[in-house]
Amino acid sequence: MDIIISNSSAVPLYEQIQNQIKTQILNGQLKPDEGLPSIRALAKELKVSIITTKRAYEELEKEGYIITVVGKGSYVCSQSTERLKEAARFEMESKLEEIIIQAKKMGICLDECIEILKSIYMEV
């Protein structure tokens, strides 16, 4: 599994791991029913604490991205990736709605918002 974490990021380590696994599931790099590294193995690979990887896996399980079978390990949930993508889209739309409300309060017009979005999209 290809995960890159940054100790200098403001985003907590478990969230960085969680977000990257989510992305790999949504873009098809990780397939339904595919096994994930054990919590211990991933912690060792990333040089982070077991508690950090355990929290990332717990959050992914709560959100329906993975399933853990006691004694067997964690696997990508076999549910439809379309449902997961729809949930991710909903989350993105909610965040954008908050940003748009803030932009309107600041008097930023739609065209300016679109330009800001395009600029950030191209940078990332």
Image: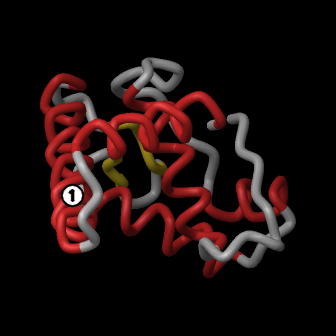
| Residue name at image x 62 percent, y 81 percent | 51
Q: Quadrant of the C terminus?
A: top right
* Residue annotated with mark 1: 100
Which quadrant of the figure has residue 83? Answer: top left
Which quadrant of the figure has residue 105? Answer: bottom left
Pick the residue in front: 58 or 70.
58
Tell me if residue 28 comes above or below residue 70 in the rendering: above
Pick the residue in front: 18 or 71.
18
For badge 1, the amino acid type reads Ile
Pick the residue in front: 103 or 55.
103
Judged left or right of residue 89, residue 7 is right
Q: Around disc 1, counting alpha carbons within 10 Å, would you say few (fewer than 14), some (14 to 19), or many (20 or more)? A: some
Residue 17 placed where, x, y %?
A: 60, 57
| Residue name at image x 16 percent, y 57 percent | 97
Which quadrant of the figure has residue 11? Answer: bottom right
Judged left or right of residue 113, residue 101 is left
Judged left or right of residue 72, residue 97 is left
| Picture mark count | 1
| Residue name at image x 44 percent, y 18 percent | 28
**Element marked by disc 1:** helix
Residue 47 placed where, x, y %?
A: 86, 66
